[in-house]
Amino acid sequence: MSAMLLNKEKWPEFVKKLTGKNLWAPKLDGEAMRFAPVAEGEEVSLDYGNTRVPPKGATFPQTETMYRFLVGNMEIEEPKMDEELVLLGVRPCDARAMKIIEKLFRWDYDDPYYLKRRELVTLVGLACTEPGLNCFCSSVGGAPDSSEGLDLLIYDLGDRFLLEAVTVKGETLIAETKELLTDSDASAVKAKDKLMADAGAKIRRTVDHDGIPEGLPGLWEDPLWKSVSASCIGCGTCTYLCPTCHCFDIQDEVEGFEGRRCRMWDSCMFEEYTLHTSGHNTRPTRRERTRNRINHKYNYFVDKFDVIACVGCGRCINLCPVNIDIVEILRRVKEAL
Amino acid sequence: MTADNPYIPYFATIEDNWYETGGDRCIKTFKVVFDDPAVRDSWSHKPGQCAMIGVLGEGESMISISCSPTEGKFLRFSVMKMGKVTQALHKLETGDKITVRGPYGNSFPVDDWQGKKILTIGGGIGQAPLRPIVEYVKANREKYAGLTMIYGARSSGDLCFKGEFDEMSKCDDLSCHLTIDIEEEDWSHNVGFVPQMLLDLNPAPENTVAVTCGPPIMIRFVLENLKKLGFSDEQIYTTLENRMKCGIGKCGRCNAGGMYVCKDGPVFSYAVLKDIPEAFA
Amino acid sequence: MDLEQLRKTAAEVVARDDVKYLIGWKKGSYGYRVAPVFVEDAAGVAELIFSPLCTANLTTYLTLVEKTPLPRGQEADKRKVALMVKGCDSRAVVQLLVEKGIHREEVIVIGCPCPGVVDQSLLVEKYGDTEEPVEVKWNGDGFMLVRGGEEIKIPRDEVLAEKCRLCRYPNPVISDHLIGAEVEKWSPAEDSGVSELDAKDVDGRWEYWEEQFNKCIRCYSCRNVCPLCYCQDCILDRLNPTWINRAVNFSENTAFNISRAFHLAGRCIECGECERVCPANIPLGKINRKMAREVREKYGFEPGLDPEAEPFQASFKPDDPEDFIL
């Protein structure tokens, strides 16, 4: 795979080239960054931590129309999905998350919506140089420069960017912009290595998950679950902002005669999630729901797909209204083993 | 269910429908036939499997297929009127169409059970997933060493499939034991709870598999009593139900511990089940 | 703030046989974070704090308790819950009493007169976030940030939470134990956020809220954190009939947010929790304060002050000037 250099003076031009495609990049929306479409000529700054909402919606939209129908008419129309999308500035943790949940969406039954969107999206990553306060990617198999799931990875070397193609899609992007690029050299590689070693050293929070996946079943009735969930208000912040959370609901929605069957993000932290129509709830309190969230990420998913379904992006910690802190929960799990 | 999109349902037409029970939470059985002859021919399911059935504009629900494939090229679903989708289903009549996708989940290992005696223990609507076993064994009697069916409900009016029990009592290798919770006039069968009836019948565990389905509290006592009778964990099977949306192990909500009920289940042997946290939650 | 008095009172309260636990604040897992804590015994009171970082309104936990079916023969735990409240929080307690969401004998209110709390996002913006444990204290007219042995004086207006600038009730309006002396009220600032919106025309307001509601991800943290959003069967969760579709789009998001605002009219006690917890940064306070202002100005009613008051939206007077209701 090729590695090329892009002088920062040429960055606006590089972005402009990409806006020829359907380009999304992080933009400031009030106080928070979020991925939004970039118009031609619009500036894109890569000087940001991470987006508030992860870019998982690019492959797993919050609401996805599965098919349309007219009420009373037994015909089903599948939506066309053919628009390519380029996401610029994806953090390695978020790209890794897309790759991780792809395993689930490929498990026995291929999920056509997720896989089609995955095929249509090109992920241009941005290696982290200033990890956030609650980042712990390196504890769970990631790294500030992990290329997993990405098509192209950009390193910010100060006065220039180093672009490394990871996949054929990445190579194509490089080929399409090659008049703006120059060949990489040893000094760039050296600078990159130094930058990434520094970035890794700046990660402050760590999780020692050794023994946790195997140990969680034994802690099923441990008092820690009640204690860590006592203050939970049962909202969906942790799960909706989680790049690996992938649970969904399916509902029929009808306006006039036009109906659609669609799926939307759902959260295992909601009381209604497991509520049977009879009124019976298999996870009746936030204790069981919190236990499920941690078990799903650190035990069930590991069992089925051999990888922890948490990429250490820290969003659930940053934004939990009541400071429920997954690093802290895992520390207590470890302690209880 | 097209080759590349498992979420797209087939259409099926209701060929017949009737009420099994009355009341607010009445149970209606639908006999449906796929509209597409190719689907009709290629469809195959095993006792214990489920299907996602629905009404366009209302939604889908996971319902166990309550007929055995040996009965013919149709499907039967017995649906209790509960929420949005089942209420919509109950409004449908013969000639109306539903959506069907599936079959989903594992099944009762009826092939492995050949040569054995089968004991089914059902309660209320819990007989619906057991009925395919009964019908399967009836159609393959030479392969099994007999079938004993215990079935109970709150009252005689709450028993499903009532018309199908008489013929069973005419065969030596089939026996049918009905029970209701409270005494009724003109009731010639047992009165009492299902777990107690199981103890009273005292079936021998040798060369037998026991399969149970019903309300959670009934299952719990049936399991206890089967153990008392000497059944090993491997001889006991049950089928679970949880809230489901996708049916294919993606949407995440039906898990009991690390098991997706829709894919890893719904059928579990007690040997497996007893180690799954949340299985009896 | 008299921490010693707080912990002594708390210890006495949790030692009582008729008390289940005390809900208070403790230092969070890092930096400026503060977390709610459920103290069940005297050993736990050492964790309790009261500082300008104690923004959360703990009253929500009174109605968040999930009641699972009791095993046969087991009786419900009817012991009291003790609760630390600031002035604004205490109004939620009163409003819950008015609505009979809770009963007086079920709660012990530990009132904490409050000179105003900080807006953590302003603190982070101006002084940077940190994973090190830090302390923020009240200091004269302002605040003091203690970080790594260094003491940084912060002027009050620089980081004061918006709800506190507008606050009319810094002292608890109900309490069984008052910690420290009441604070002197300050004159509330003009609610410029609401006034600016009021000054826009209908299209301008619609445009503003369209942009805001488009950001909503329907995590329902606003609803769940709200001490007065406690319907057992919320219309949002209802499917049969479906009042609000689960699809996330402007239309449904608006239906959700406006329904909530209407349901809170004459009930919202302006604790600002909805806005604080919103991960999408929707200025929900503006909607709810607008409704509160309307009710205050048009009906002369303020919720959460008098436990004996009639609930605003659920009372009828025979001399009501509107005759449509009959």
Image (cartoon, coloured by chain):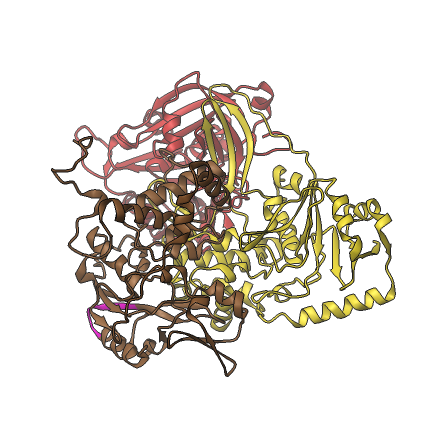
Q: Is residue C207 magenta?
A: no
Q: Tell me, yes or no, if residue A326 can be seen here.
A: yes
Would residue A243 appear left or right of A257 to someone viewing this image? right
Above or below C248: residue C180: below
Viewer-proximal residue, C299 or B119? Answer: C299
Residue A322 image position (x, y, % from top left): 42, 62
Would residue B84 appear left or right of C81 to someone viewing this image? right
Q: Tell me, yes or no, if residue B136 can be seen here.
A: no
Q: Drawn colour of chain C?
A: brown
Q: Residue at x 33, y 76 (%)?
A: C44
Viewer-proximal residue, B231 or A7? Answer: A7
Q: Which chain is yellow?
A: A
Total residue callouts = 0
Would residue B199 appear left or right of C312 to someone viewing this image? right
Q: Quadrant of residue C184?
A: bottom left
Would residue B64 appear left or right of A213 to someone viewing this image? left
Above or below A296: residue C37: below
Residue A89 image position (x, y, % from top left): 68, 53
Q: Is residue C18 magenta?
A: yes
Residue C85 image position (x, y, % from top left): 29, 66
Residue B203 image position (x, y, % from top left): 35, 45
Viewer-proximal residue, C165 or B90? Answer: C165
Q: Which chain is red?
A: B
Above or below C58: residue A21: above
The residues colored magenta run C16-22
Q: Residue at x 77, y 68 (%)?
A: A193
Q: Residue furthest top?
A: B95
Q: Residue furthest bottom?
A: C149
